Image (cartoon, rainbow, N blue to C red):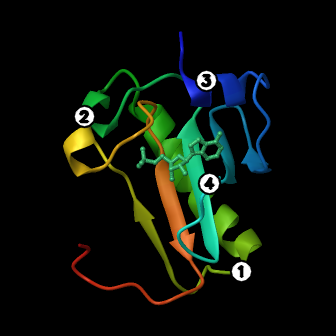
Amino acid sequence: MDCIFCKIIAGEIPSKKVYENEHVLAFHDLSPRAPVHILVIPKEHIASAAEISAENSVYVAKIFEAIPEIAEAAGVKEGFRVVTNSGTSVGQSVMHLHFHLLGGRAFSWPPG
Ligand code: AMP
């Protein structure tokens, strides 16, 4: 499968890894939009949030279990944002489910 994040999981493409367990990998975004910009992804290929189901939701649970630890290690546990883009119309560019963990600056709400 020609998926860049699957290749990162397989170690075929380098990444700046910050966290890993059986279900989850987290690494720095290549083009950070904030002082802290980490991508948290499932180790199974799930195309987007639109493809989350009872069969694969354990990966989502494991991701959100890991996020407090990742945020703490990044120094932003007191305030961070978690975002996922699902679909090209809202800006998804990599078709492997990922949650952007953003912090280290102020963010507007609602997002643009
Ligand atoms: P999205 O646009 O929501 O699909 O987010 C995809 C994110 O992946 C973007 O923020 C990119 O900067 C990031 N990205 C793409 N390729 C890589 C890579 N090889 N390593 C780290 N981040 C990447």
Q: Would you name the residue on which mark 2 appears? A: 50
Position of residue 105 measured from the top left corner of the image (x, y, whole percent): 54, 87
Residue 87, quarter of picture:
top left
Q: Would you name the residue on which mark 1 appears? A: 75
Q: Would you name the residue on which mark 3 appears? A: 6
Measured Cα–Cα span from mark 3 to mark 2: 18 Å
Give amino acid for label 3: Cys
Q: Is label 2 or label 4 in front?
A: 2
Q: Are marks 2 and 4 in contact (CB under 8 Å)?
A: no
Give amino acid for label 4: Ala
Q: Earlier in the sequence, mark 2 or mark 4?
A: 2
Give the secondary structure at mark 4.
helix
Q: Is label 3 or label 1 in front?
A: 3
Q: Quadrant of the C terminus?
A: bottom left
Give the secondary structure at mark 3.
helix
- Image point 67% across, 23% down: which residue? 7
Give amino acid for label 1: Gly
Taking the view exactly as shown, the residue that stands out farthest to the top is 1
